[in-house]
Image: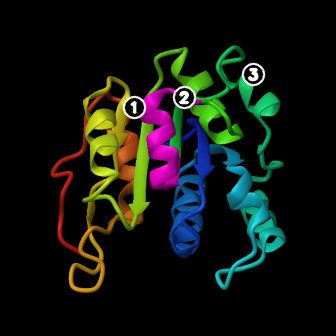
Amino acid sequence: MSLEGVRIGYAISGSFCTFEKSFAAAEELVKAGAELLPIMSFNAASISTRFGTAEENVRRFEDIAKRKVITAIEDAEPIGPKKMCDVMVVAPCTANSLAKLALGITDTGLTMAVKSHLRNAGPVVIAVSTNDALAACAKNIGILQNYRHYFFVPYAQDNFLKKPNSIVADFSLIPETVEMALKGIQIQPIIRQL
């Protein structure tokens, strides 16, 4: 797979338990030749958890992308007008971010990045990670899967016994999903087994 010269807006929201998988996927995109524009939601960039401090996570992302992370609305707004990205990836995409994207709410740097990118009708790749995907969040996943320009990384229930409503994307499939989305094709099957 070659993504040589492809400009990818790579946005991370606050599903902290998947950050390691997301960073690994970002590294794979860079190895395939892509240029990353790193974006983090305010929470993803500012909350320290057992999965790393906020500073460590921002620094690691900046090291991968070789650029400063965008977190502010005003810094994300030029993405569309300046045509800074060929594709936008949101990995992980939490239930909160999914709901905002489904309803057109633009109140974070991440949602502004997606909105600004969509003004050019560019593809948006969603790697969902949420504990209520098969409950309250299900309608928002359904809405986005029916919108033009949205493409989903294949996902599965990650622990159906202890968390029956939870799903998580297969982050290893982000590069392939990006490649297909650039051709306007949704990778199949979307629902898989881990």
Residue 185 x/y as whole percent: 26, 33
Q: Nearer the viewer, mark 3 or mark 2?
A: 3
Query: Label 1: which residue?
Result: 182
Which mark, by number, is residue 18? none
Q: Tell me the element at label 3.
A: helix
Q: Amino acid at mark 3?
A: Pro
Nearer to us in this view, 20 or 178: 20
Separation of residues labelled 3 and 2 (CA atoms): 14 Å
Residue 69 horizontal side relative to residue 132, left or right: right
| Mark 1 or mark 2: whose residue is earlier in sequence | 2
Which mark, by number, is residue 86? 2
Q: Tell me the element at label 2.
A: loop
Residue 171 horizontal side relative to residue 65, left or right: left
Determine the image quadrant of residue 192. bottom left
Separation of residues labelled 1 and 2 (CA atoms): 8 Å
User: Does 99 lie within the magenta span?
Assistant: yes
Q: Are marks 1 and 2 in contact (CB under 8 Å)?
A: yes
Q: Are marks 3 and 1 in contact (CB under 8 Å)?
A: no
- Tell me the magenta residue range: 90-105
Q: Amino acid at mark 2?
A: Asp
Determine the image quadrant of residue 16. bottom right
Determine the image quadrant of residue 145. top left
Q: Residue at x 59, y 55 (%)?
A: 13
Residue 37 x/y as whole percent: 69, 42
| Mark 3 or mark 2: whose residue is earlier in sequence | 3
Relative to 52, does residue 120 appear above or below in the rendering? above
Q: Residue at x 78, y 58 (%)?
A: 62
Separation of residues labelled 3 and 1 (CA atoms): 21 Å
Query: Label 3: which residue?
Result: 78
User: Does 151 lie within the magenta span?
Assistant: no
Relative to 140, does residue 19 appear above or below in the rendering? below
Q: Amino acid at mark 1?
A: Leu
